[in-house]
């Protein structure tokens, strides 16, 4: 019932308003300065009168004790209204900014400044006229300004009463009440509640993502709507609704529609600003030196110098663009677990402690992210002509101790990754490979349980247990497959082998089964040689794997065709809706083609091609990867390329030429021969040089 009462009062107040042309917010700034000047003058007069042993009324104590608060209020009012270039204004009931009249109505009609009553009053106002977001943003400051003027008027009355020797009870209570309401207003927290009063915000909240963004990101969405509305000469609400309709029709998110660029930003001007001056300078130098080679040789250094200069100027002149953020009230979810690392150098005994303190500041600044945001140091040592010595080992030990201290203090969440410096012959130094880029690449390999030069010196290793378990399952599965194959080979032959024996006049071996083709080997083993319950589990798993594998492969093929072919050929597929239709159609076509092939092509042929694909992959990967892991830097890079090409080529030749030897062994043999030649050509080196320094 109270809300209904205040809504009715809000409607009555709004019905009294007569709009006038818009006015700048500087008017409110001037009023605030005048009110503060009056307050300070009256405060001095009151203080002087109190020194003459006149009895001090309670209102005078309140005024003198809260003078600091009144100055802060005036500064906040000035800052808020100065940023408003234009605000709606009224000519009746009096000439002023509309938000100021609204503030006076709130203080007159609302007994207690509480969130429910204030929002109910605003709802009544907005049922008659729609308030702009700028007015809602400065509403609390307008309330402060109105109360500031009331305090100034009360202090004037108090000073006059002290001058006359008597202060009325009404003047004393009015001053105390105004200061008390100012304190009450300071405790109000209406940020998102006032934001929801904005008509544009109510339209944008139809989007699935917008309500979950933080306040700054939502504000940027609304500001973008206002810019578009001004360009199109539309109301803000119509522009917001139009953007929502477009996003739903194109099946895109709202941000993509609002911030869509009519013409994608390219780097043409940036490249031209570097290359054109560099070319002119190179030509001038060529003429000056009377040597074309001089200009050509200086072209790249000039380009690099100009690029550095332009980058410096651009970063100083162009403001950064902030990324939109979600307001994760419960922190980062488990599926979004994030590791934030600093690629850095340990340059002294104290550097580890300093970097750990920086990680701690990052952790404290992102407490709202929760336990699924982890922090780490990706550490290297500086370049050196000597291997890592005792002093450098102490630097690493100190950094490890600092990270362990953080883990004890915050119950985990901090890591120290370290790379021991290796000798790079191309640089003649002991150093980490490719500094930051190389460290990040090795971190990616480390997290995927791929061998790398990175060591985890501090942090919880249990986070890697899942990946390590997955890698550890590969050898047992392979061994089990080999065992099944050997067992079935001893108990079954194929129909083709049986026909060959009969044609040669030989009898079939006793107790040996006959299979139509090799594709039936594993299903026959499961059905006839495993317990019923376990066989059912295996067949169900195979069905899920076949369906999931087919779905994944068809989706991958469709995605590649749509993104890399269709969109390159025609612009009709640029919209999300058209791309989705094309993807679905391509998936259906791929599945239909697969079904036709499965029905027409013999299953044995499909099985043979499956084995051929595995042979090609094995020939490409096995020998080169083995050399990279166990003989790093020993093979010449040209031979490594020949190895990856010669292996699969040998497999294909052995398959289609009908070689009596398994094609996989032919490919592996060719790859091994090329690898041996590459190692002989590369020669021994003092230490591994896997990559050149960037």
Image (cartoon, grey):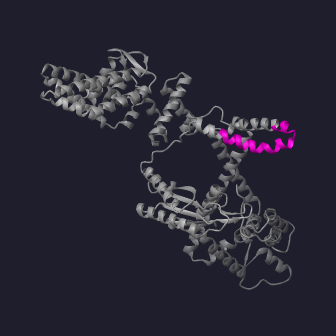
* In the rendered image, the vertical position of residue 578 relative to residue 73, given as above or below: below
Residue at (74, 61) in percent of width and height: 426
* In the rendered image, the vertical position of residue 552 relative to residue 484, given as above or below: above
* In the rendered image, the vertical position of residue 514 relative to residue 585, given as above or below: below
The image quarter in which residue 674 lies: bottom right
x and y percentages locating residue 27 in the rendered image: 39, 20
Asked if residue 593 is among those painted magenta in the image, a careful observer would answer: no
Question: Residue 463 vs residue 184: left or right?
Answer: right
Kindly report the secondary structure that dominates the magenta region of the rendered protein: helix
Residue at (48, 32) in percent of width and height: 222
Residue 38 seen in the figure:
yes
Q: In which quarter of the image is the C terminus?
A: bottom right
x and y percentages locating residue 137 in the rendered image: 40, 30
Asked if residue 299 is among those painted magenta in the image, a careful observer would answer: yes
**What span is in magenta?**
285-310
Q: Nearer the viewer, residue 264 or 343?
A: 343
Looking at the image, the residue that sits furthest to the bottom is 510
Q: Which of 584 and 477 is in front in this view?
A: 477
Residue at (74, 40) in percent of width and height: 569
Residue 540 seen in the figure:
no
- Total count of labels: 0
The image quarter in which residue 535 lies: bottom right
Q: Nearer the viewer, residue 592 or 10?
A: 10
x and y percentages locating residue 14 in the rendered image: 33, 20
Question: Residue 413 vs residue 295: left or right?
Answer: left
Q: Quadrant of the N terminus?
A: top left
x and y percentages locating residue 264 in the rendered image: 66, 35
């Amino acid at each position: 019932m109270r809300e209904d009462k205040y809504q009715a009062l809000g409607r009555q107040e709004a019905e009294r308003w007569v709009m006038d042309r818009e006015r700048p917010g500087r008017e409110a700034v001037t009023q605030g300065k005048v009110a503060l000047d009056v307050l300070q003058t009256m405060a001095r007069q009151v203080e002087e009168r109190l020194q003459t042993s006149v009895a001090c009324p309670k209102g005078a104590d309140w005024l003198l004790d809260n003078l600091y608060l009144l100055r802060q209020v005036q500064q906040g009012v000035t800052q808020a209204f100065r940023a408003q270039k234009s605000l709606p204004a009224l000519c009746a009931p009096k000439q002023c900014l509309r938000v100021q009249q609204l503030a006076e109505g709130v203080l007159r009609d609302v007994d207690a400044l509480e969130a429910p009553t204030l929002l109910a009053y605003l709802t009544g106002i907005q049922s008659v006229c729609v308030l702009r977001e700028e007015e809602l943003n400065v509403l609390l400051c307008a309330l402060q300004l109105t109360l500031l003027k009331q305090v100034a008027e009360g202090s004037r009355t108090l000073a006059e009463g002290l001058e006359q020797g008597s202060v009325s009870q009404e003047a004393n209570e009015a001053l105390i009440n105004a200061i008390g309401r100012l304190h009450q207003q300071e405790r109000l927290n209406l940020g998102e509640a006032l934001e929801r009063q904005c008509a544009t915000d109510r339209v944008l909240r139809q989007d699935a993502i917008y309500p979950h963004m933080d306040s700054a990101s939502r504000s940027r969405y609304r500001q973008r709507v206002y810019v578009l509305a001004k360009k199109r000469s539309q109301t803000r609400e119509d522009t917001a609704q139009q953007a929502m309709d477009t996003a739903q029709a194109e099946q895109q998110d709202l941000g993509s529609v609002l911030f869509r660029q009519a013409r994608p930003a390219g780097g043409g001007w940036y490249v031209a600003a570097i290359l054109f001056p560099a070319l002119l300078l190179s030509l001038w130098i060529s003429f000056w030196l009377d040597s074309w080679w001089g200009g050509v040789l200086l072209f790249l250094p000039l380009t690099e110098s100009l690029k550095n200069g332009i980058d410096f100027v651009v970063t100083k002149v162009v403001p950064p663009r902030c990324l939109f953020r979600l307001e994760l009230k419960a922190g980062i979810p488990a599926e979004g677990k994030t590791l934030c690392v600093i690629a850095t150098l340990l340059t002294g005994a104290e550097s580890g402690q300093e970097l750990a303190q920086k990680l701690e500041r990052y952790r404290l600044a992102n407490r709202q992210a929760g336990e699924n945001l982890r922090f780490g140091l990706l550490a290297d040592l500086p370049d050196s002509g000597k291997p890592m010595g005792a002093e450098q080992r102490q630097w690493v030990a100190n950094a490890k101790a600092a990270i362990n201290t953080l883990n004890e203090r915050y119950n985990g969440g901090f890591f120290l990754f370290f790379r021991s410096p290796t000798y790079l012959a191309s640089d003649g130094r002991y150093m980490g490979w490719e500094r930051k880029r190389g460290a990040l690449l090795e971190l990616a390999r480390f997290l995927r349980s791929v061998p790398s030069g990175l060591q985890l010196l501090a942090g919880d290793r249990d986070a890697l247990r899942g990946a390590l378990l997955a890698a550890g399952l590969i050898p047992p599965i392979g061994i089990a497959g080999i065992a099944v194959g050997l067992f079935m080979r001893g108990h079954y032959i194929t129909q083709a082998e049986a026909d060959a024996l009969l044609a040669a006049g030989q009898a079939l071996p006793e107790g040996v089964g006959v299979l139509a083709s090799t594709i039936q080997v594993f299903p026959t083993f499961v059905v006839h040689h495993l317990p019923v319950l376990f066989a059912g589990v295996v067949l169900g798993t195979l069905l899920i794997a076949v369906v999931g594998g087919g779905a994944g492969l068809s989706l991958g093929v469709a995605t590649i065709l749509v993104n890399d072919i269709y969109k390159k050929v025609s612009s009709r597929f640029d919209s999300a809706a058209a791309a989705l239709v094309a993807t679905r159609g391509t998936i259906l076509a791929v599945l239909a083609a697969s079904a036709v092939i499965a029905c027409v092509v013999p299953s044995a042929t499909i099985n043979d091609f499956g084995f051929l694909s595995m042979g090609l992959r094995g020939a490409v990967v096995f020998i080169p990867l083995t050399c990279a892991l166990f003989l790093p830097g020993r093979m010449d890079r040209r031979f490594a390329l020949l190895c990856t090409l010669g292996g699969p080529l040998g497999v294909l030749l052995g398959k289609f030429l009908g070689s009596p030897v398994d094609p996989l062994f032919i490919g592996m043999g060719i790859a091994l021969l090329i690898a041996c030649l590459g190692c002989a050509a590369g020669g021994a080196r003092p230490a591994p040089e896997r990559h050149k320094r960037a």
